[in-house]
Image: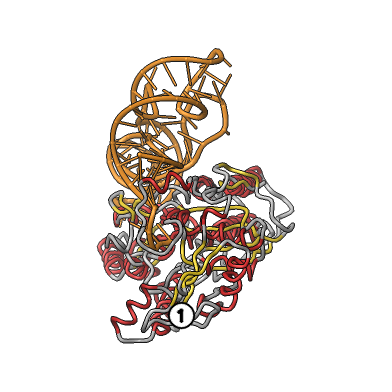
RNA sequence: GGCGGCAUAGCCAAGUGGUAAGGCAGAGGUCUGCAAAACCUUUAUCCCCCAGUUCGAAUCUGGGUGCCGCCUCCA
């Protein structure tokens, strides 16, 4: 049973999909007006793992994530650069994919863009006007929050309370300061589309209602994003969608905590942000993933280079073990030997237990921090086994190492970790052979107790970024 | 002012009312020619404070303190 914390009910609930075996997910995407920073990336890493886990558990997942490609900020950048808004949006959508691909984030099934769904948006707005939830004012269309009984149910706000100390503009044409724009009348020089209310463009919140309803229908399963979207964005989406359809909009609302810097929210306006592309020049993408996943998705996560470096060392421990295991699985042995001893059976049990514990952790509101702890426990057991298992017969040992590699890949794959590095080096085989040669020469020196030569080789290789380890099972080398 | 969240070792961090996971860093040891990696031991009589419920609370309730976020664009 999978349980999730639902912002709507403020408690953990059992997850029951709308349709058995299928899960629908809508995640609020980005406004493409510059490169994504790691705060932006957090929900996408989170949802990538949620999706991978649901798929692992056998669900067929439909994952939709929008691009807000019409927006003041895009228009501003376009004007500043003297380019069309489409060019800006296209450029940063491309940049978005580049960064997210680097982080091994699976692509959503649909990436709807606002600019390609104007007709659907106009339909929803028109329906809201027809049903009396919206009013037209000089080419603008506003949503009238007083008309929707459930207004505030997601964010826990009460309209009356918000008016008191509200920081909202009063001097406009809205009936209530909390009313928000569904459609904005065109201003000179801005992109605009024809509508029943004249030329204009969509308001911010309406796109997600129109597009999620189009691709996922009413009452879809998961709606997610950063917790700064709870109000007003998601509150307004609910108001629009439920007023429009008369049905439940989305059933489970999941929200990420923020990434902070020195305990302050990372944000573009504060200027304290780190771009994904910049971080990836210093750290492996898996380190960033591991760092994000080492804290539960709802908790705040403080970012610094030191903390990333710590994550890198921790992940390195897991990778060391996996590399060691892979050293024995050049030839896979998938068949269980007829005869096994106690050590084999114990390791098999450890592996099965890891799978169960991992799922238990993930079932509990996608507790990746706990799931990672399971991987560390598994790692220790495998290391201990390798250290103690020299008398184990070869086929049996290889079988177990194959099992060990598989469980690492199976569980790590859910977190998007341990992807085999695509080594595009055409000289790969040559490098392998040369390394073997160098290692053989060094071994020769070691046998002759020529430590000077042996250490010289090791030191020189280290300067080239290659680590030599003399394990009890023989020398091993690795990059970095 | 309204609403919400968080406070667990040097640091990061999980924790379902039953007596504190995991990781990083540190210390000691085993292994090693020396290292590295790995393994073992060790590091919170205690979970911000106070009161309460309970046989029993880090976990529940009330009060306080501190920090953060949202209420304006924001992942």
Q: Please state the chain letter of the residue tagged with numbered disc 1 in the rendered image.
A: A
Label 1 residue SS? loop
**Image quadrant in which you'd find residue A403:** bottom right
Query: Foreground residue, A109 or A217?
Result: A217
Residue A61 placed where, x, y %?
65, 64
Q: Is residue A350 visible?
A: no
Residue at far bottom of view: A83
* Rendered image coloring scheme: secondary structure
Q: Nearer the viewer, residue B74 or A450?
A: B74
- Give the side of residue A90 with respect to residue A304, left or right: right
Figure check: A220 above or below A31: above
Q: How many marks?
A: 1
Q: Residue at x 56, y 48 (%)?
A: A8
Residue drawn at x 54%, y 64% as measured from the top left: A134
Q: Nearer the viewer, residue A386 or A211?
A: A211
Which x, y percent locates residue A46? 50, 58
Tell me residue A199's x, y (percent).
48, 81
- Closest to the observer, A256 or A49: A256
Q: Which residue is mark 1?
A: A424
- Where in the figure is residue A328, as x and y percent of width and height? 54, 61
From this view, report whether residue A72 is shown above or below residue A46: below
Q: Is residue A466 left or right of residue A254?
A: left
Binning the other alpha carbons within 10 Å of mark 1 as few (below 14), some (14 to 19) or many (20 upward) gives: few
The answer, for residue A120, to whether it is visible in the render is yes
């Amino acid at each position: 049973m999978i349980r999730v914390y639902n912002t709507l009910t403020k408690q953990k609930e059992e997850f029951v999909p709308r349709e058995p075996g299928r899960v629908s997910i809508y995640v609020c995407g980005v406004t493409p007006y510059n490169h994504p920073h790691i705060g932006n990336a957090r929900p996408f890493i989170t949802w990538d793992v949620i999706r991978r886990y649901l798929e692992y558990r056998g669900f067929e997942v439909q994952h939709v994530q929008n691009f807000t490609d019409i927006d003041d900020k895009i228009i501003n950048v376009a004007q500043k650069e003297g380019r069309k808004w489409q060019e800006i949006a296209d450029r940063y959508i491309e940049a978005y994919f580049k960064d997210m691909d680097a982080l091994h984030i699976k692509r959503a099934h649909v990436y709807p863009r606002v600019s390609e769904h104007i007709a659907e948006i106009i339909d929803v707005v028109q329906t809201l006007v027809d049903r009396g939830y919206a009013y037209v004012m000089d080419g603008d269309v506003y949503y009238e929050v007083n008309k929707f009984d459930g207004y505030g149910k997601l964010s826990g706000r009460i309209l009356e309370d918000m008016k008191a100390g509200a920081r909202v503009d009063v001097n406009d044409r809205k009936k209530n300061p909390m009313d928000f724009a569904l459609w904005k009348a065109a201003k000179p020089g801005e992109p605009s589309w024809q509508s029943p209310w004249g030329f204009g463009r969509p308001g911010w919140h309406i796109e997600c209602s129109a597009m999620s309803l189009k691709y996922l229908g009413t009452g879809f399963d998961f709606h997610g994003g950063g917790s700064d979207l709870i109000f007003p964005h998601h509150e307004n989406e609910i108001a629009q969608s439920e007023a429009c359809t008369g049905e439940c909009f989305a059933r489970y609302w999941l929200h990420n905590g923020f990434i902070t810097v020195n305990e302050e929210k990372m944000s573009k306006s504060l200027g304290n942000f780190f771009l994904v592309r910049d971080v990836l020049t210093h750290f492996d993408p898996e380190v960033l993933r591991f760092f994000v996943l080492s804290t539960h998705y709802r908790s705040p996560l403080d970012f610094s280079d030191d903390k990333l470096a710590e994550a890198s060392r921790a992940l390195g421990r897991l990778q060391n073990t996996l590399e060691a295991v892979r050293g024995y699985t050049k030839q896979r042995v998938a068949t269980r030997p007829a005869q096994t001893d106690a050590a084999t059976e114990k390791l098999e049990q450890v592996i099965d237990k890891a799978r169960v514990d991992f799922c238990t952790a993930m079932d509990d509101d996608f507790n990746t921090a706990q799931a990672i702890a399971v991987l560390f426990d598994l790692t220790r057991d495998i290391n201990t086994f390798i250290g103690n298992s020299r008398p184990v017969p070869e086929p049996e040992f290889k079988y177990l190492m194959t099992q060990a590699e598989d469980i690492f890949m199976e569980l790590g794959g859910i977190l998007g970790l341990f992807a085999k590095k695509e080594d595009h080096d055409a000289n790969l085989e040559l490098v392998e052979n040369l390394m073997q040669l160098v290692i053989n020469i060094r071994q020769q020196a070691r046998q002759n107790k020529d430590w000077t030569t042996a250490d010289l080789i090791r030191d020189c290789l280290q300067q080239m970024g290659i680590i030599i380890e003399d394990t009890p099972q023989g020398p091993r080398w690795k990059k970095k």
